[in-house]
Image (cartoon, grey):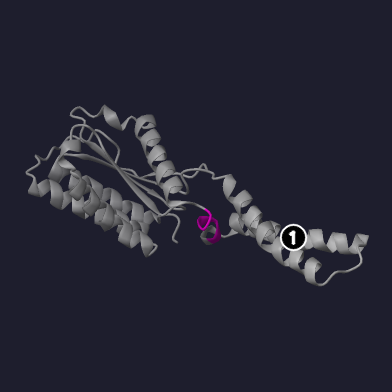
Amino acid sequence: MKHSLTDNDRIFLESRVAEVEKQTGIQIVLATTKRSDSYIEIPWKAFSLGVSASGLPVFFIGLFLPLWVTNTTILLSITGMLAPGILLALSTTVFRSVARLFLSKHRKETETLQYARSLFLSRELFATKERKAILLLISEFERQVVILPDTGIREMFNPEAMDKLMAGMIEPLKNKSIRRAFEAGLIELQQSFSQQGANGSITNELTNKIIAEDSL
């Protein structure tokens, strides 16, 4: 995946944010993060799976091909069980695709939502005069999109509208394009609020710059 937006991507998206804000009257904030949590349990899950999987062959070899018990055979047995677990655990720290195999759908959805809520509060996106801000967050490792509208526009987002907006962003994200995912979200917001007769506003209360947090 293209894990960070280029300068051209940022310039384009920030100009699109300003354009959509003028047409809809809402305050739009785009944000990306490398990951929403450190997921320290992932290497341990991988290690456990590797040891468990390699332990069975070692057990059956000892059962059906009995050998004299020596220090060497004991060492080889232990190494044969631990090595796959260690290698699998290390691979989760190097390859994101491997690490994702040990991350449940519920866990990644919970963590990205929690991260988005924390970001919404820490950046004080609730501070707009009419509470018409909306946060569009993309968490790259989880490949998740979170959309958080403030109270002033929340009623406009029924489940159907939210699902449509989410689906429009997730599809490009699956194709490894963060820029196109944000583009799709902005287009959907523009169309949705225009259809609902939202009044445009020239007051820009929040920055149009894309928030990029890569601390985890």
Residue 215 in the image: above or below residue 16:
above
Q: Is residue 6 magenta?
A: no
Q: Residue 196: image x %, image y %?
A: 8, 45
Label 1: which residue?
81
Residue 78 in the image: above or below residue 40:
below
Going by the picture, which residue comes out furthest to the front?
64
Going by the picture, which residue comes out furthest to the bottom?
65
Residue 91 in the image: above or below residue 117:
below
Q: How many marks?
A: 1
Residue 80 in the image: above or below residue 17:
below
Residue at image position (58%, 46%) is 41
- Name the dominant secondary structure of the magenta segment: helix
Question: What amino acid type is highlighted by mark number 1?
Answer: Met
Instruction: Give the structural element (helix, strand or loop) at label 1.
Output: helix
Whether residue 12 sits left or right of residue 188 in the image: it is right
Q: Is residue 64 at least partly visible in the picture? A: yes
Q: Residue 112: image x %, image y %?
A: 41, 44
Residue at image position (31%, 61%) is 171
Whether residue 37 sits left or right of residue 209 in the image: it is right
Q: Is residue 100 magenta?
A: yes
Residue at image position (61%, 55%) is 46
Which residue is nearer to you in this view: 143 or 107? 107
Occupied quadrant, residue 83:
bottom right
Q: Residue 31: image x %, image y %?
A: 36, 45
Q: Residue 211: image x %, image y %?
A: 38, 42
Which residue is nearer to you in this view: 164 or 195? 164
Q: Quadrant of the N terminus?
A: bottom left
Whether residue 144 sits left or right of residue 162 in the image: it is right
* Magenta residue span: 98-102
Count neighbours of disc 1 (C-alpha within 10 A) and say few if under 14, some if 14 to 19, many if 20 or more.
many
